[in-house]
Amino acid sequence: MMDVLFPRNEHTIDRAVRVVLGLALLSLVFFGPQTLWGLVGVVPLLTGLVGSCPLYRLIGFKTCSGEGCA
């Protein structure tokens, strides 16, 4: 069911970078300048956790290959 809505199109390294970037941006909400702009980190965090990027799907791009990729 999840693969129908969010087909996997991200490589493992791409996913890891997105999760780290998302967490770093979210930390700006609590540390540093404490601005709500850090909430932008929710987007890379969620796409990294799910393994599917809607923008990649829209333009027909994918970084993963092999079994389980869309």
Image: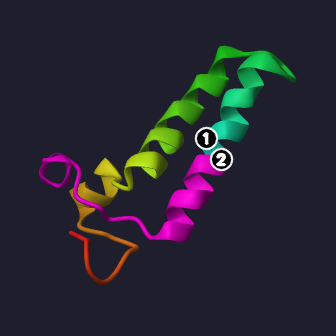
Tell me the amino acid under the disc marked 2: Leu
Pinpoint residue 4: horizontal percent, then vertical percent.
Answer: 12, 52
Q: Residues within 10 Å of mark 1 (few under 14, many from 20)?
A: many
Mark 2 crowdedness (10 Å alpha carbons): few <14, some 14-19, many ≥20: some
Image coordinates for residue 44, horizontal then vertical, percent: 51, 44
Q: What residue is shown at x 26% (from left), y 80% (from top)? A: 67
- Look at the image and give the residue range highlighted in magenta: 1-20
Q: What residue sits 35% from the left and 52% below the top?
A: 53
Write down the quadrant of residue 27 in the picture: top right
From what the image shows, is residue 35 above or below residue 69? Answer: above
Picture quadrant of residue 16: bottom right
Q: Is residue 39 above or below residue 36?
A: below
Any magenta on residue 65?
no
Relative depth, front residue between 8 and 63:
8
In the image: residue 39, left or right of residue 8: right
SS type, badge 1: helix
Q: Could you tell me which residue is drawn at 22 percent across and 58 percent down?
A: 7
Q: Nearer the viewer, residue 8 or 39?
A: 8
Q: Residue 21, labelled with which disc?
A: 2
Cβ–Cβ under 8 Å for marks 1 and 2: yes
Magenta stretch encompasses residue 16: yes
Residue 24 horizontal/vertical position (percent)? 72, 39
Q: Secondary structure at mark 2?
A: helix
Q: Is residue 10 left or right of residue 30?
A: left
Q: CA distance from mark 1 to mark 2?
A: 4 Å
Picture residue at 79% right of the left edge, 15% below the top: 34
Which residue corresponds to mark 1?
A: 22
Instruction: Give whichever of 51, 57 is nearer the camera.
Output: 51
Q: Outermost residue, bottom direction?
A: 66
Q: Amino acid at mark 1?
A: Gly
